[in-house]
Image (cartoon, grey):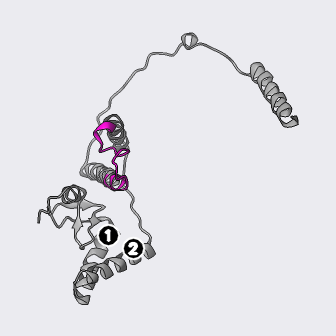
Amino acid sequence: GGGEDARAEAAARLGHLLRRTTIRTLKSDIRLPPLVRVVSSLPFTRAHATSYNELVAFLRRSLLLADWADPSHQESLLNPRQTKLAMEAVRNLREAACVTGVFPVGHNAEEMDESLLDLEHSLRGKGMGREAAAARVSELRYPLISARGECQRCRSYAFMPLVTPCGHLLCCGCIAVVAGGDSGN
């Protein structure tokens, strides 16, 4: 048909143009100077350590949440079959941490209010009184908005903590343990 002829002509014209403008070479023809790697130690301050730890916490949180969204766990970096990709992610994290500064975290106020209201309704639906549910949600508001709080299970600092359906604020390590079946505290 006419459309096929037009496509064939366009392909021929493109091929002719590429042959005139493209430089062909072999990898063996390219001469690059040898790579020189220089390692410089920089002062590592408490702020750097905090920033690195927050980046690690963010990655762990993302891994956990992504794993829960994959019921078969085939795509999860926590799957032993994905070890190569998981190691690559860790290597990338380490390299990124060399230049990281403050890890910015923001939230959508309307979505936060909606989520906290849903949590309050859920707590009331589980038998918690109106005032107790409102107080619990009020306690959770600041740690969730600031993305920092104390884990109620291990009592450690938690960056980007998660809230359980029963209203507990947990770090990623404790969420993984609780989700694995150890109810802990």
Residue 128 % position (x, y): 22, 84
Provide the residue designation for mark 1: 144
Residue 70 % position (x, y): 37, 52
Picture quadrant where residue 147 is located: bottom left
Magenta stretch, residue numbers: 64-82
**Which residue is pictured at 55% across the width and 14% down the height?**
27
Q: Which mark is residue 112?
A: 2
What kind of residue is marked 2? Met
Give the SS element for disc 2.
helix
Residue 101 % position (x, y): 36, 51
Using residue 111 as the reference point, say whether residue 86 is left or right of it. Answer: left
What kind of residue is marked 1? Leu
Of residue 93 and residue 83, the one placed in the foreground of this image is 83
Vertical position of residue 25 compared to residue 149: above or below: above
Of residue 64 and residue 99, the one placed in the foreground of this image is 64
Q: What is the C-alpha distance between the residues marked 2 and 1?
A: 8 Å
Using residue 172 as the reference point, say whether residue 154 is left or right of it. Answer: left
Picture quadrant where residue 150 is located: bottom left
Q: Residues within 10 Å of mark 2 (few under 14, many from 20)?
A: some
Furthest-left residue in this view: 185
Q: Are marks 2 and 1 in contact (CB under 8 Å)?
A: yes
* Magenta-colored stretch includes residue 67: yes
Picture quadrant where residue 93 is located: top left
Residue 83 % position (x, y): 31, 36
* Quadrant containing the N terminus in the rendered view: top right
Vertical position of residue 62 compared to residue 19: above or below: below
**Which residue is pictured at 39% across the width and 58% down the height?**
104
* Magenta-colored stretch includes residue 97: no
